[in-house]
Each structure stands twice: as structure tokens, then as C-alpha cells.
Image (tube, helix red, strand yellow):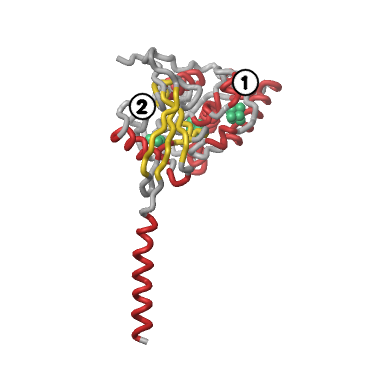
């Protein structure tokens, strides 16, 4: 009996030893990166392949930093939060728009490619200027709360909001402006003035907000065109690739119905309230 117990304990120990051994068997990854620096006249777009040893729970954030630290300090890419919150690390991973900081290498094959998001100004290699595009979009659709009351009193306690409504608004407000929906949109690639799913979702969010005085006639001015919601071809790549799982297909369908109703029946008159004038952006 004692022998059997000892044998079992030894077998258990052996099993425990075997687990870390297995976990240590990491792959050697081949990573092909599209390199191009538009600021350098001698630079030509080309794929450069690097070998990197995979580690436990490795994300593309860890991989790219290791690459830059140990093999190629000239590699350009963006990261800020490393937690899927800032939206700055979106890139094409094997051709699919993805947040690199949330992408685990264990979900990728031994050899994969990284490329910058298409449709945005290229800064260099994997770094694109999504911020510039998002700012332009935001100004175009005026994605801020147009308050009912012009005299804002910041020391006054805010009017409470129904928690269910607050939750609905929060659901749409989780957009991190990563640009994955724009980069995956075939319509945007054909007509660069298309506002994109990100803008349609934002209008849907402000439409829910009782503090915003705008009505459907005002939103029709922004979205009721071919470069707005009527230009969308409903192929829904935006929905499939949104890393925050925003309900884009529902919002697009809803806003298209509301804009069609407004366009055909003219249910509402545009609000006469003035909009907040835009100030020129000064970056220095
Ligand atoms: S559904 Fe519309 S917004 Fe989304 S990817 Fe297709 S065309 Fe673009
Ligand atoms: S809607 Fe989704 S994919 Fe588009 S910018 Fe926002 S978070 Fe990114
Ligand atoms: S680094 Fe912020 S979302 Fe990836």
C-alpha cells in the first residue's frame, strides 16, 4: 500500500515537472512587416522579415517592442495604453484590421504579416495618422453634445439620467476611434468622403442623449447623403472587425431608417439653435 502511495506521488511529481517543460517549448516566429517611410525619398515599400522567439502570453505589443529594442530601432509603430483603450495600435495582421496590443501571438500562425491600416495618412511603417482623420470626421459631424441650455453652469449638479438610458449611451460611447471599421470599409476605399461606421455610430449616440437639442432634421443634414448613411453598402466588415464589439450593423440600419423617414416625410424641422462655432486648431 505504502509502495503504491509512493509510486502515485512520484508519478504526480513527474507530471508537474512535465507541464513547465511543455510550456517552455516556444515557437520561432517569422514576422513580415511592410516597411516604408514616406518622409525619406530613398525609401521604397517592401516586406522585411524578422525572426522572434515567442514567449508566454506574448502580444504583438510585446513582440514589436522586442523587435525594436533588439533588432531594428528604426521600426515605427504606435502604442499608448497596451489595454485596448486608446485605439492607437490598430494595424493589419494577416490582412485583418486588429488592435495589436490585444492580439496574442499564440492565435497566429508561425509566419504572419503586419501592415499599416489603409485609408489613413501613413507616418511610417505601421504608424498611421488616425487622429487627424478622426478629428476631421468629428468636426464634420459635430460629434459633441449640443446643449439645450447655452448658459452652462459647471457648479450646478447634473440632472440625473435614467440608468438604462445611460447604459445604452455608454454602449455606443465605447468607441476608441481605432479606425478598424474605416480601414475595413470597401465603400470608404472607393469614396474617401464617406463618413464611415464610426461617424454613424457617434450620431446614433448623440441622438439618444436628452441633453443634445438636435433632431432628425439636423442629423439629416449631416448623414442624409451618399457620403453619409445612404452610401453604406451594408457589407458589414465594420461590424465584423470592430475590436470593441460595438453594434454597428444595428446602428447603421437604425440610422438609415430614421434618415429615410426624415428624407421622405420630413417629419421634423431643423432646430433653429445655433451650433457651437469651430475654432481654428493651433498645434504650437
Ligand atoms: S456596412 Fe457600410 S460602413 Fe460598414 S463596412 Fe460596409 S459600407 Fe462600410
Ligand atoms: S466603431 Fe469600433 S472599429 Fe470603429 S473606430 Fe470605433 S472602436 Fe474602432
Ligand atoms: S495601445 Fe491602446 S489600444 Fe492598443
* Residue underneath mark 2: 76
Please tell me whether residue 11 is drawn above or below residue 193 in the rendered image.
below
Question: Disc 2 vs disc 1: Cβ atoms closer than 8 Å?
Answer: no
Report the residue marked by disc 1.
Answer: 224
Mark 1 residue element: loop
**Mark 1 CB near ligand 1 (8 Å cut):** no
Q: Where is residue 167 in the image (x, y as percent from the top left)?
A: 49, 41
The quadrant of the picture occupied by the C terminus is: top left
Ligand 3 occupies quarter = top left
Question: Residue placed at 59% from the left, 21% from the top?
Answer: 228
Q: Nearer the viewer, residue 261 or 24?
A: 24
Q: Position of residue 120 (x, y in %)?
A: 47, 22
Residue count near mark 2 (Cα–Cα under 10 Å), binned few <14, some 14–19, many ≥20: some
Left or right of 98 in this view: 25 = left
Q: How many marks?
A: 2
Q: Is residue 213 left or right of residue 253?
A: left
Frontmost residue, 166 versus 49: 49
Q: Is residue 116 above or below residue 64?
A: above
Q: Which of marks 2 and 1 is nearer the N terminus?
A: 2
Q: Which of 33 and 132 is in front in this view?
A: 33
Q: Is residue 207 visible?
A: no
Q: Position of residue 107 (x, y in %)?
A: 47, 45
View extreme (bottom): residue = 1
Query: Which image quadrant is residue 184 in?
Result: top right
Mark 2 and mark 1: span between their CA atoms?
A: 39 Å
Measured from the top left, where is residue 225 in percent x and y? 62, 18
Compared to residue 184, the image places residue 161 above or below, namely below
User: Which mark is drawn over residue 257?
Assistant: none
For numbered disc 2, what is the local secondary structure?
loop
Amino acid at each position: 500500500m505504502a509502495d503504491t502511495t509512493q509510486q502515485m506521488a512520484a508519478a504526480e511529481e513527474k507530471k508537474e515537472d512535465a507541464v513547465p517543460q511543455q510550456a517552455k517549448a516556444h515557437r520561432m516566429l517569422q514576422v513580415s512587416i511592410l516597411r516604408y517611410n514616406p518622409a525619406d525619398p530613398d525609401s521604397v515599400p517592401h516586406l522585411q522579415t524578422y525572426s522572434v522567439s515567442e514567449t508566454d502570453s506574448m502580444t504583438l505589443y510585446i513582440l514589436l517592442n522586442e523587435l525594436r529594442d533588439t533588432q531594428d530601432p528604426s521600426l515605427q509603430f504606435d502604442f499608448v495604453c497596451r489595454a485596448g483603450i486608446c485605439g492607437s495600435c490598430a494595424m493589419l495582421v494577416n490582412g485583418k484590421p486588429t488592435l495589436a496590443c490585444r492580439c496574442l501571438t499564440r492565435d497566429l500562425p508561425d509566419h504572419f504579416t503586419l501592415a499599416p491600416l489603409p485609408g489613413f495618412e501613413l507616418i511610417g511603417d505601421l504608424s498611421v495618422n488616425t487622429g487627424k482623420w478622426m478629428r476631421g470626421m468629428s468636426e464634420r459631424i459635430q460629434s459633441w453634445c449640443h446643449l439645450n441650455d447655452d448658459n452652462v453652469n459647471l457648479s450646478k449638479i447634473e440632472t440625473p439620467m435614467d440608468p438604462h438610458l445611460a447604459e445604452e449611451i455608454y454602449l455606443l460611447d465605447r468607441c476608441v476611434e481605432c479606425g478598424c471599421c474605416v480601414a475595413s470599409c470597401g465603400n470608404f476605399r472607393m469614396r474617401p468622403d464617406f463618413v464611415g461606421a464610426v461617424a454613424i455610430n457617434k450620431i446614433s449616440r448623440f441622438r439618444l442623449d436628452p441633453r443634445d437639442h438636435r433632431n432628425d432634421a439636423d442629423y439629416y443634414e449631416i448623414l442624409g447623403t451618399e457620403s453619409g448613411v445612404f452610401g453604406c453598402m451594408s457589407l458589414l466588415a465594420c461590424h465584423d472587425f470592430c475590436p470593441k464589439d460595438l453594434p454597428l450593423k444595428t446602428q447603421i440600419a437604425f440610422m438609415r431608417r430614421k434618415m429615410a423617414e426624415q428624407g421622405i416625410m420630413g417629419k421634423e424641422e431643423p432646430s433653429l439653435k445655433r451650433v457651437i462655432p469651430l475654432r481654428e486648431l493651433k498645434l504650437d
